[in-house]
Amino acid sequence: MALEMVTGALVSTFVERTIDTLASRLVHIFGARKHKKKQLSDLKMKLLAIDVVAFDAEQKQFTDPRVRDWLLRAKDVVFDAEDLLEEIDYELSKSRQVEAESQSATNKVWNSLKSSFVTFFENEIESNMQQVIEDLEHLATQSDFLGLKKASGVGVGSGSSSRLTYTSLPNESVIYGRDDHKEFVLNWLTSDTQNNLSILSIVGMGGLGKTSLAQHVFNDPKIEGKFDIKAWVSVPQEFDVLNVSRAILDTITSSTDHSIQQEVVQRRLEEKLTGKKFLLILDDVWNERQSKWEDVQKPLLFGGQESRILVTTRSEKVAVTMRSEKHLLKVLSKDYCWDLFAKHAFQISNPQPDPDFLEIGKKIVEKCNGLPLALKTMGSLLHSKTSVWEWESIMKSEIWDFSENESDILPALRLSYLHLPSHLKKCFAFCALFPKGYRFDKECLIQLWLAENFLESPLQKRIPKEVGEQYFNDLLSWSFFQESGKEEEKHFIIHDLLNDLAKFVCEDICIRLGVDEPKGIPKTSHHFSFPTSGVVHFDGFGSLIDTQKLYTFMRTDMRMYNPFCFPWYCKMSIDDLFSKFKFIRFLSLSHCRNLREVPKSVGNLKHLRSLDISFTKIEKLPDSLSLLYKLQILKLNYCPRLKELPSYLHQLDNLRYLEFINTKVKIVPAHLGKLKNLQVLMSSFYVEKNKEFSIQKLGQLNLHGSLAIHELQNIENPSYASEADLKNKPDLVELQLEWNIMDSSSVDSTKAGDVIENLQPSKYLKKLSVRNFVGKQLPNWVLDNSLLNLVSLSFMNCTCCQHFPPLGLLPFLKKLEISGFDEIVSIDADFHGNNSCSFKSLETLEFSNMSQWEKWECQALTRAFPCLRQLFIRKCPKLKGELPEQVVPLERLQIEDCQELEASAPRTLYLLLSDCGKLQLDCASLRSLTMGGHNMQTSLLEIVGKSNTLDLLVIYSLLESLEHLRISRCHKLESLPANMHLLLPSLWYLSIEDCPRLELFPNRSLPSNLKELRIRKCSRLVGSLKGAFGDICSLKRLKFEEVDAECFPDEGLLPLSLTDLSIYHCPNLEKLEYKGLYQLSSLQTLTLFDCPNLQRLPQEGLPKSILNLIINQCPLLKQRCQKEGGEDWEKIAHIRHLYIPK
């Protein structure tokens, strides 16, 4: 009978379970050779001998380097033991099928099998196992000399008395003790300034909450709409100009720029920011080299006036380097410390804690020295401790007395780590593989833990995914993980100080290329990561890593599984790379640009559990992949050349995750349904024509995520659709059903209706899209509201459908898109479910391409759409009826190509009108207008009492709140109203583009608060500007584009209040008129862009007030402004900031 083993700090459940299993199987194979079994028993006992003192070693490692060295060596020997067990287990797995059939197999076959394994064991395993046993004996002896004690069962790290509960607290809705600081930063962001670009640095030590403060400010409603662009960038500690510039560009564009030339990236960034008022958060900056910052800053200077950069940093030198204002963040005051600690320690479960807990808690709060991170982490730890003596034990721990300098780890964080159960310590410490600021995905991290054998389930009562979710939620609850600040992307991060803690406890085990070399890379490393954001080529491991011992090889970008991350190249051949691995478990070659073929040698990676070759150019998988008996995860996403999957996948018994999203795979291999634990993520499934067994394959699969089923017209018998069994796939949360029919006249609409009826999804579906459906009625499972969990619904080109189901009754529906319903004439109360309070969660509603739609009966539904934020109506040429009334203004309203629509439009903040009828607008809350088209029936001047020549905008009342106005392509507009200063008292930005007839800009008629004016391609208007500004003193920024003049600006043309003047795209401009510039005593920034014939600066020079001069794409002028030999250099040498690209 196998000895029972207690899983502790070093020895995993996998080792325990594997030893017990192998012990019984080896008896069967070796028979009377009892010394084989004894050797395995010795291994178990020696492992246990060091495991029982490991808890004490973990606590002492923070202050005793000798103990730390012993602990790291002990971990390495345990890894060696695990490797041996893996080898034995693999060899037995190869023979599992023969062994299972041994009763029917001949004795000759069975004896041959046993003989082969005995030879393997004696040649490959026996001597190595003896060496491991001797190493363990040596470690046990050393532990005595070091005075390491056996675990006392107090609960530190064992989890025996800890109650872990999951909460959502890491996503803090309240920021304690920082209200004044938040108000200061908000005031700084919204205050008026004459500077083109202002910078503020929030400075403070680690753990003070600088990032949290910046996050709360970044998402505050007070700055909503104040900036054209908002971007958040977590800055790498290694401040590389190219990488930082590219990170800013990628964040702004929500894509990835793969350019490796700094000039290209910065030019694109300049183009995106030019004239745009932006807010940029640079989080956790360490760079103190001014030259690097100046290089990064160059394209940022092209932004609009009053642009802001908010920086968080631990170093005051960083603020000096960036020439920024400085705001110091200090520790929390005593009262706020208690509030933050109590929120996490007591929570809702114990609103009135026992006085004993209160007394101890207040003493612990004092020890946290006002650091929010320490308070939150300790509070989360103590929430799981239910007895007073546990709280007292933590409060009296000697770790509080250790100097932080002894390990650079805060005492509160050390204590929190020591009190984690051993399985959570392992999972957390593994995260040392991630760079600081790394955003990781919950499911992907759980899969990583699975591949590394971290997910332990006693008696295997729960599936690994459930175990992993529990582990993750526990670490989240204990504040070791935090939710990322971006709500639209569910990612998580680890605070930098906790990242330091993880790196400390497994420094030699987890190695990050480019980060950890300065400390020396030992040959005991088992997990290896390299960044692709700064490393374009991977050229090898060097000589200090024993690659045969590696378990993990993965690339890291700014976030886990980022579809927009940087591609990388492997300088060595993939075959050579594979040859360096022996025990590799997790292998990620995702985004490897030169991976075109998976070599056959992949079959030698016999311990591989996870293989990710997504975003590569592979076309097929080799047959040798079938030898990977332990493979659990296979990811083939975004491989555009991959057309088929191998037929042998069903033979990989341990396969749990198969992903092939956005590939050209159209046929699912047969027999995958035999793998009962397999989860499949596939973006598309194509129904094959004239195949009896096609869509039925889906019925065998455990589908997850999103799926689009194409070519549904190929289903011959509607009953086949029911065999897809979509109703019983609760993890399939997004579904698209699509027909591909060119000629609808030959379509059997009855059959199409039966098919879609049989494709009913599960009630857990969240997103549904139906495209090109040719039935006359949408399925009953939509009509009877079987899909109550839907949040997004789209019906596209359902040309034959004659009425809508009661979609208004879907309680959680947030987005509804309806397009191409050619038979719909009227939308009545049935659409709303005959309920006056319908669509109670809907935020976005879109109608388009409704060629026959005439009427929308919605006026009686006074309480409908209470949450609606966006309404789009496009290409509905016959629509005449009413639009819904809104109690709360919409955020965005777009009406295009609705020529007959005459109605009262709902109130909105942002309005786009194009080619629509005569609308009545309530403009009390309007902020931004965009106009276009040539068939508008009501004009701006009808509202202001002038003429009806403008065909792009309708305004019926005073726009007291309008802040932003753009008038574009108004070819009939000849003048602006004289009383604009009365109609638009809040207007601060005005853009007039391509209005060739506009020439009258009456004196003193501009709005009194106007700050920015842009005039493009309006030659007559420019000529009438003289005297138009009157006494206006608010105008700070003026931009001219495509001015048709040889000499510019004329004397008296520009307002004296101007601080920023830009002249763009003027091919005929040859000379700057000094008389038009010399009186501009407030001018600070002058930009000259794309004026190829501009020959020189004024003879008299430029106004002395100019601080920033930008000259770009003006070749003649650029030559004269060079420092060496430039004829105009003396005129600009005094200017502080010059940007004249070479």
Image (tube, rainbow, N blue to C red):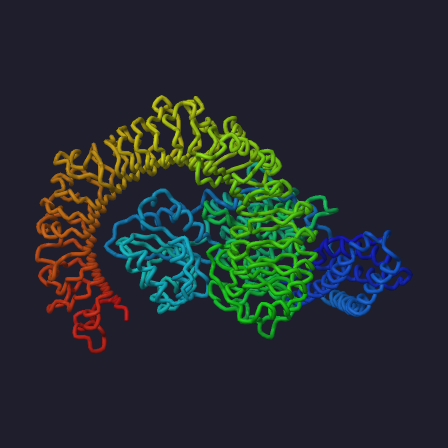
Above or below: residue 2 compared with residue 935:
below
- Tell me which residue sits at (22%, 73%) in the image: 1122
- Tell me which residue sits at (56%, 47%) in the image: 682
Q: Is residue 1138 left or right of residue 128?
A: left
Q: Position of residue 19 (x, y in %)?
A: 78, 57
* Residue that lies at the very extreme toward the bottom in this rendered image: 1125
39 and 548: which is toward the camera: 548
Do we see residue 415 in this rendering?
no
714 and 1131: which is toward the camera: 714
The image shows a total of numbered marks equal to 0
Q: Is residue 153 left or right of residue 172?
A: right
Above or below: residue 704 compared with residue 562:
above
Q: Is residue 958 left or right of residue 1023?
A: right
Q: Position of residue 908 (x, y in %)?
A: 31, 35
Q: Quadrant of the C terminus?
A: bottom left
* Residue that lies at the very extreme toward the front in this rendered image: 746
Do we see residue 739 in this rendering?
yes
Quadrant of the rendered image containing residue 873:
top left
Q: Position of residue 736 (x, y in %)?
A: 50, 40
881 and 180: which is toward the camera: 881
814 and 913: which is toward the camera: 913
Q: Position of residue 536 (x, y in %)?
A: 48, 67
